[in-house]
Amino acid sequence: MYKAAVKSPIRVFILEKSMFKRFIEWAEINNWNIEINEGTNDLPENILNRYSIDDNWMNFIKHFKLCENSDSTKWFLTVNDYFPVSNGFQWNEFELQSLDACGNDDEWRKNIAQYWDNHFPIFISVDDEYSYYAINTQNGNVVYGSEPEFEEATIVADDILSFVEMIIAGNIKF
């Protein structure tokens, strides 16, 4: 499992606590809808079997039941979002759309599946265009992708801690 380049587990804990508080302040200033998760949730087994989840991401996102902009058009995927739903946007909606576009092209389908097996979606936007942020589970980078070619992503941060810091600093606009 990927670990951020931090020397001490105590430092990671302190960094996360401080970052969480600063992120909540950022969310309030930017009129985001936040619901704090009072319980302890685990990801579904199928997610844990498919992905090596970044500990820093889990320690951050497990505190949220809901984390979305005021228009409900952009949201961080919380633990609850990774459970199947009967209607609405799925956590892997862009993978499903790409696979649907493949038709019977087995090679294209294989490439899409391989991409998404290595990219864990953490944020979705349906605002101006469909887009997402995901953690590359092979190296910890955070990537940004958008329609029409969701799998043509750009690296935006070296790791999840840097990504959240960039959001707080206003270097990533939502």
Image (cartoon, rainbow, N blue to C red):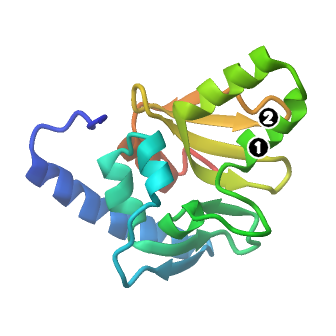
Q: Residues within 10 Å of mark 2 (few under 14, many from 20)?
A: some
Q: Are marks 2 and 1 in contact (CB under 8 Å)?
A: yes
Residue bearing mark 2: 99
Lateral position of residue 164 relative to residue 18, left or right: right
24 up-or-down from 5: above or below: below
* Element carrying mark 2: helix
* Element carrying mark 1: helix
Instruction: For marks 2 and 1, give the CA distance.
Output: 5 Å
The part of the image, by quadrant, that contains residue 114 is top right
89 up-or-down from 97: above or below: below
The part of the image, by quadrant, that contains residue 81 is bottom right
> Could you tell me which residue is drawn at 54 percent across and 78 percent down?
34
Residue bearing mark 1: 96
126 up-or-down from 120: above or below: below
Name the residue furthest top.
107
Q: Is residue 99 visible?
A: yes
Q: Is residue 169 visible?
A: no
Q: How many marks?
A: 2
Lateral position of residue 160 relative to residue 110, left or right: left
Q: Closer to the camera, 58 or 33?
A: 58
> Could you tell me which residue is drawn at 84 percent across and 47 percent down?
129
